Amino acid sequence: MKVYEYQAKSILAKYGVPLLRGVPVFEAGAAAQAAEGLSTSGPWVVKAQVHAGGRGKAGGVKIARSLQEVADISRAMLGAKLVTRQTGPAGIAVHRLYIEEACDIARELYAAILIDRSSQKICVLASAEGGMEIEELAEKRPEAIRRMLIDPLQAPGVGAFEAFSSELGLEDGERERFGDALLKLYEAFVHEDASLLEINPMVITRGGEVIALDAKLIVDDNALFRHPETAAMLDPQAEDRLELLARKSNLSYIDLDGDIACMVNGAGLAMATMDIIKLYGGSPANFLDVGGSATVERITAAFRIMLENPNIHAILINIFGGIMQCDIVAQGLVEASRTLNLKLPMVVRMHGTHEEEGHRILRESGLSFISAETMSDAAEKAVRAAREAAQ
């Protein structure tokens, strides 16, 4: 789950990460008053709050030197589309702003913490060259980004981060303050169950302070039950509507641009199903994992979500009956099909527990399910059915 910059900073503040004061704004009329509450003379920085990087280049971060400028910039930003390299050409509508104190920047650094799955460790990244061009830096001069791996079972002390900071060519006081900030970021990352924490830029002011000027935080969805206050920060406007509906039904769903809808149990099997559809010349319309158990209600909810896509020409159901029993799935498919009056061709491959009973239920239902034995067979039939339906 992604949170906005101002939300991330409210979380980081609990760990003592050095930050500037700021106020979130949701209406342009409240912007000047919010800025005045921070400083009567300014300057201030008005930041668009969107789940995408590259805001500065796209005009989503602007300095205001008067309260009137704060009001004018806020009025122009709210409701506008912000287009960055991460949003794509469609852009993202801005519904929230963050008005923050300005500071006198002497140097911009970069810091990030993420999970390195290949080593099964936590990876800390840092660079002496932070700012808007970090993506270009990573591409052209990756050696400029330093890397430190940490065993999550062996908590490092501030000395480890100070030593790491020395690789950036910082002076003694800067190195100590940057190392201390990294330690606090690490503590926040671990305790908040984050999968990504990025500060770009982390700045050194002319007074020698180290400040997190930006904050990008992604929290592991699977850990949100431990962080109800973070879960409450979810912005439905920023989420894909179908993915939000799926989450409410305990389904894992991602919308894609193909025409063959997929309903599968297990993320690995779902990925393999999409791959084999592509292998046979088709295009999957979604990733949909119904999990380890399926009720009629969940299957019906899955069908409703898939059918929201007007481009679907066929449905491929690929079930491995382990804990989930094939006969229960078959009953759910039959009842959901009747409830929703499904007319699209449906290819069903089921193997595992109560497989024969499941196939019997489908055969005797009177509905036109297309049975498949193997994944190759299922993919070939689904691609053929989708092409015929599209004609």
Image (cartoon, rainbow, N blue to C red):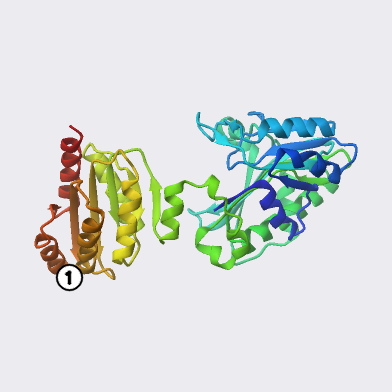
Residue depicted at x 39% and y 44%:
255
Question: From this viewpoint, is residue 360 visible?
Answer: yes
Give percent across and percent down for residue 232. Answer: 60, 59
Quarter assignment of residue 41? top right
Using residue 35 as the reference point, say whether residue 381 is left or right of it: left
How many numbered circles are shown? Answer: 1
Quarter assignment of residue 386? top left
Q: Is residue 140 above or below residue 191?
A: above
Give percent across and percent down for residue 208. Answer: 86, 43
Using residue 338 as the reference point, say whether residue 105 is left or right of it: right
Give percent across and percent down for residue 75. Answer: 70, 33
Using residue 254 as the reference point, say whether residue 212 is left or right of it: right
Q: Nearer the viewer, residue 182 or 304?
A: 304
Residue depicted at x 24% and y 63%:
332
Q: Nearer the viewer, residue 210 or 19?
A: 19
Using residue 351 as the reference point, say whether residue 80 is left or right of it: right
* Secondary-structure class at tag 1: loop
Which residue lies under the disc numbered 1?
Answer: 354
Graded by Cα atoms within 10 Å as few (under 14), some (14 to 19) or many (20 or more), the crowding at tag 1 reads: some
Give percent across and percent down for residue 11. Answer: 69, 57
Q: Is residue 108 above or below residue 367?
A: above
Q: Nearer the viewer, residue 29 or 160?
A: 29
Residue depicted at x 81% and y 37%:
44
Q: Is residue 120 above or below residue 205?
A: below
In the picture, the quarter occupied by the C terminus is top left
Residue depicted at x 61% and y 59%:
230
- Residue type at mark 1? His
Question: From this viewpoint, is residue 169 visible?
Answer: no
